[in-house]
Image (cartoon, rainbow, N blue to C red):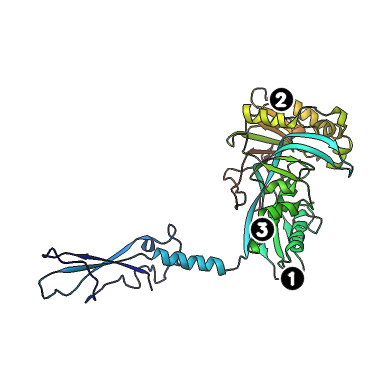
């Protein structure tokens, strides 16, 4: 029954009369079928998204029999179904199990990347400004009837579908940490190229941890997920930041910072078909040849003056250019052809993506020369996320190759 709030409105020829409630001879409520269309009652919805007949405040007025004293009193009955509907919707939300979830899995760029030392365990310490961007994959999760195995599919070849994939590793990690017995069917709609220095696989792992936690009523905190994720990859914890972070250690020490660069600034990503092996790049790294600029000074300058070429230092560029000499040529040509078009041109991560910040358009030579017919191209922007929400896919997110026939990473219909 609808919740009801009653207000008595009294009028009297006597100044001593007061408002009162008393039985009415007739109260008329809207007929049961008033909200129906074609004989079907629409499902209840929250206020603001419910059918118009439910959103409207209903007001019913009934007049009582005329009192003997000649006074006429009115009783106005007003009912508002929204509170009751919202209570019912909340109850459904609490009790209905989650069975499917589709999430955006964005990648990142390293606006600057300093390598500060080699550690005794063989890893390198870094100091870098990581920032999430609008290019990303789409991952669909469904609960599996299996109690023993996840099933992963994807739209591109060459992606491992077993526990070599970071998505499966992340789901195994979540079950290990929480004792959950839920397994999943996962489809990965891949748009981020591999071997690009964009952290696509790390983002997929972070997204899988977030999804598993949603299916398990968020029994782990974001901080838990961030700490656990460092066990399977150094870049994964960053994606549990709000989108912009100063990262140190192997990359797993994440300090949230306000976005130092305007989210409106466009960029273009240009990646040749060849990938850079991260292990090979680090093998060729010579610490005596790296920059000696204080990374905190870079962050301060960036926050104060905005992005510029002198801020976007990447200590992995030199060894990456040894691994892939054509990548050095590509960067040099972009800088020369786009003089004045880009605020900065730099390599992200360990390569092989070259980023031009300041314009979404690649230089014309990329379209006109046969050598670059198979490069991956995508425009992008910096993005962030709100607390307790995952990243959202921007409506204008696109990715194509130079000849316009698709990069091999286009989404499935």
Question: SS of the residue at dot 2?
Answer: loop
User: Where does the image place residue 88, in percent across and percent down from the top left?
Assistant: 47, 68
User: Where does the image place residue 394, in percent across and percent down from the top left?
Assistant: 58, 45
Give the mark nearer the N terminus: 1 vs 2: 1
Q: Is 177 placed above or below 122 here?
A: below
402 or 344, which is in the foreground?
344
Does the rendering let one see residue 351? no
The residue singled out by tag 3 in the image is: 211
- Residue 147's tag is 1
Inter-mark Cα distance, 2 to 3: 39 Å
407 or 281, which is in the foreground?
281
- For image coordinates 89% across by 43% down, the residue present is 122
Q: Is 288 placed above or below 142 here?
A: above
**Callout 2 touching callout 3 (CB < 8 Å):** no
208 or 287, which is in the foreground?
287
Image-based side of 73 in relation to 186, left or right: left
- Residue 280's tag is none
Q: Nearer the viewer, mark 1 or mark 2?
A: 2
- Residue 310's tag is 2
Give the mark nearer the N terminus: 2 vs 3: 3
Give the mark nearer the N terminus: 1 vs 3: 1
Question: SS of the residue at dot 3?
Answer: helix
Quadrant of the rendered structure where residue 214 is? bottom right
């Amino acid at each position: 029954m609808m919740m009801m709030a009653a207000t008595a409105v009294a009028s009297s020829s006597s100044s001593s009369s007061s408002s009162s409630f008393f039985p009415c001879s007739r109260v008329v409520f809207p007929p049961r079928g008033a909200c129906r269309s074609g004989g079907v009652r629409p499902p209840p919805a929250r206020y603001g998204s419910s059918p118009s007949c439910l959103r409207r405040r209903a007001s019913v007025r009934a007049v009582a029999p005329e009192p003997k004293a000649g006074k006429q009193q009115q009783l106005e009955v007003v009912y508002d179904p929204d509170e009751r509907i919202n209570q019912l919707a909340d109850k459904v939300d609490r009790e209905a199990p989650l069975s499917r979830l589709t999430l955006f899995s964005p990648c990142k760029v390293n606006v600057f990347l300093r390598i500060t030392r080699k550690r005794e365990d063989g890893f390198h310490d870094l100091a870098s400004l990581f920032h999430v961007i609008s290019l990303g994959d789409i991952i669909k999760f469904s609960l599996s009837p299996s109690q023993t195995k996840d099933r992963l599919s994807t739209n591109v070849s060459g992606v491992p579908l077993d526990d070599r994939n970071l998505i499966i590793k992340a789901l195994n990690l979540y079950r290990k940490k929480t004792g959950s017995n839920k397994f999943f069917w996962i489809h990965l709609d891949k748009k981020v190229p591999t071997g690009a220095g964009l952290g696509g696989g790390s983002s997929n792992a972070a997204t899988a941890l977030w999804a598993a936690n949603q299916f398990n009523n968020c029994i782990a905190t974001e901080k838990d997920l961030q700490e656990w994720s460092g066990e399977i990859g150094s870049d994964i914890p960053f994606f549990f930041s709000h989108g912009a972070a100063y990262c140190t250690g192997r990359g797993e020490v994440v300090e949230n910072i306000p976005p130092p660069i305007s989210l409106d600034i466009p960029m273009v990503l240009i990646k040749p078909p060849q990938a850079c092996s991260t292990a090979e790049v680090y093998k060729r790294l010579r610490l005596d040849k790296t920059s000696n600029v204080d990374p905190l000074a870079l962050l301060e300058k960036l926050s104060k003056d905005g992005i510029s070429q002198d801020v976007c230092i990447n200590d992995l560029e030199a060894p990456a250019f040894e691994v892939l000499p054509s990548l050095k040529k590509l960067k040099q040509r972009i800088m020369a052809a786009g003089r004045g078009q880009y605020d900065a041109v730099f390599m992200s991560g360990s390569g092989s993506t070259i980023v031009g910040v300041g314009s979404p358009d690649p230089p014309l030579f990329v379209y006109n020369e046969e050598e670059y017919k198979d490069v991956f191209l995508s425009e992008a922007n910096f993005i962030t996320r709100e607390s307790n929400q995952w990243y959202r896919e921007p409506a204008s997110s696109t990715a194509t190759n130079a000849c316009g026939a698709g990069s091999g990473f286009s989404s499935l219909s």
